[in-house]
Amino acid sequence: PAIEASLLDDLCNLPNLTEESILANLRLRFQHHSIYTYAGSILIAINPFKFLSIYNPKYVKKYDNHQLGKLEPHIFAIADVAYHTMLKKQVNQCIVISGESGSGKTQSTSFLIHCLTALSQKGYASGVERTILGAGPVLEVGEENSVAGSNRGRPP
């Protein structure tokens, strides 16, 4: 049976939730330059292997204090929800980034840190972000080695 391709931004809204329909939706979204897709509160990212304009500071402001799912899926939305939930509930938050080697985990982490720093600094330039981003090589020491390889041999 043919799968009707759609551009749904949340896989949970697919009429028939099958591996085939999920992959078709992700493929179609990627072809339309939408690299992020939700699966409920989980964000799926497909590495475009190029810089996109969706990471400039205006996007941090665009996603500031919006409920998840109200705007197009974005890593800044995940950062924003974690940040504001932490402030509101006074409970630590955790964002898990997983994927295969080369899938963009390190870059996604950088985007998250950029967004969280901007939110906490209310958009003012700060040395805090440079300090945190500079810790990347130290943080990567704790990364798990897999059958696919290690980050140690890859350039940043």
Image: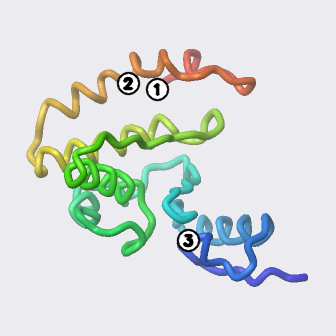
Q: On the picture, is 39 further left or further right than 110? A: right
Are discs 3 and 1 less than 8 Å apart at CB?
A: no
Quarter placement of the N terminus: bottom right
Quarter-of-image position of residue 26: bottom right
The mark lying in front, picked from 2 and 1, is: 2
Please report the residue visible at 35 percent of the width from the left and 44 percent of the height from the top. 112
Residue 62 position, x and y percent, is 25, 67
First-in-chain label (3 vs 1):
3
Badge 3 local density, few (<14 within 10 Å), some, or many (20+)?
many
First-in-chain label (2 vs 1):
2
Please report the residue visible at 23 percent of the width from the left and 55 percent of the height from the top. 57
Residue wearing tag 2: 136
Are discs 3 and 2 less than 8 Å apart at CB?
A: no
Are discs 2 and 1 less than 8 Å apart at CB?
A: yes
Q: Circle 3 — which element? A: loop
Give the Cα distance between marks 3 and 1: 31 Å
First-in-chain label (3 vs 2):
3
Q: Is residue 127 above or below residue 87?
A: above
Q: On the picture, is 14 further left or further right than 57? A: right
Residue wearing tag 1: 156
